[in-house]
Image (spheres, helix red, strand yellow):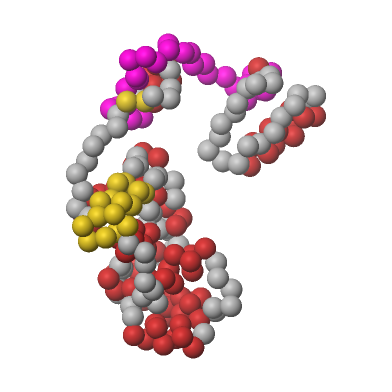
Amino acid sequence: PQPLAAAFGTWTMESIMPDTIEAWGELGARFDVLGSTPIASLLPHCRRILHSSIFYAHVIDYDDMIYLPLLLGLRFFRNDWVLIDEAQDTNAVRRELAARMLRPDGRLVAVGDPHQAIYGFTGADGRSLDAIREKFPACTLHLSVSWRCPRAVVDVARTYVGHIRPAATAPAGETATETYREMLASVAPGTAVLCRFNAPLVDLCFRLIREGKPAKIE
């Protein structure tokens, strides 16, 4: 704890996110955790919890792994090239890590899709790609052709993301709308069921096994 305490006294995260009531308030509003409580009354507790987490150094969690190297000003291996995949899910700390890994004359490639941003709970937001463009500064190369999906699937996707288009070699494919009960009846070995959440897949997997249909969750 002592080295961490000393480091926190001499180094601050101000370069990433200002330690102001406005910045804390914006975070609280974004994640809807304030309710009717004014941020001014919560701020001392937020800061105390952050400090306690930093000084609790005999247990290192994933957040510590990406936060403490910056907090302690550790030395990074510098690279000619740095690639960020799923860049829409980066937050300020992860973007700063990428910057520290890059040589001054190096090049960063960030690949992402703002329509697929799902890591808001880690501090990512819909502006992650914009923030990368501003920080590095970067030019944009659009990847609007789907090489994965048949034309019928792309047609459905276009109702949500208008700029996507199928590859010239994409098969026609087909889509159908079914109720959950109809889907259960049509599932057979070799069928893949995708879901945005894990919990419904667990229920479905056990239900199929009870019906004598082999199933597993990847």
Res 191 → quadrant: top right
Q: Quadrant of the C terminus?
A: top right
Asked if the magenta segment contains residue 92, the reply would be no
| Residue 208, placed above or below residue 177 | below
Labels in figure, total: 0
The span picked out in magenta is 160-185
**Which is the main secondary structure of the residues drawn in magenta?**
loop
Q: Residue at x 54, y 78 (%)?
A: 57
Image location (x, y in percent) of residue 13: 33, 73
Residue 160 vs 84, above or below: the answer is: above
**Which residue is pictured at 44% across the width and 57% down the height?**
122
The answer to which image quadrant residue 212 occupies is top right
Please provide percent x and percent y for residue 199: 63, 42
Residue displayed at 65% across by 21% down:
190
Tell whether 32 sits left or right of 96: right
- Whether residue 45 appears in this view of the structure is no
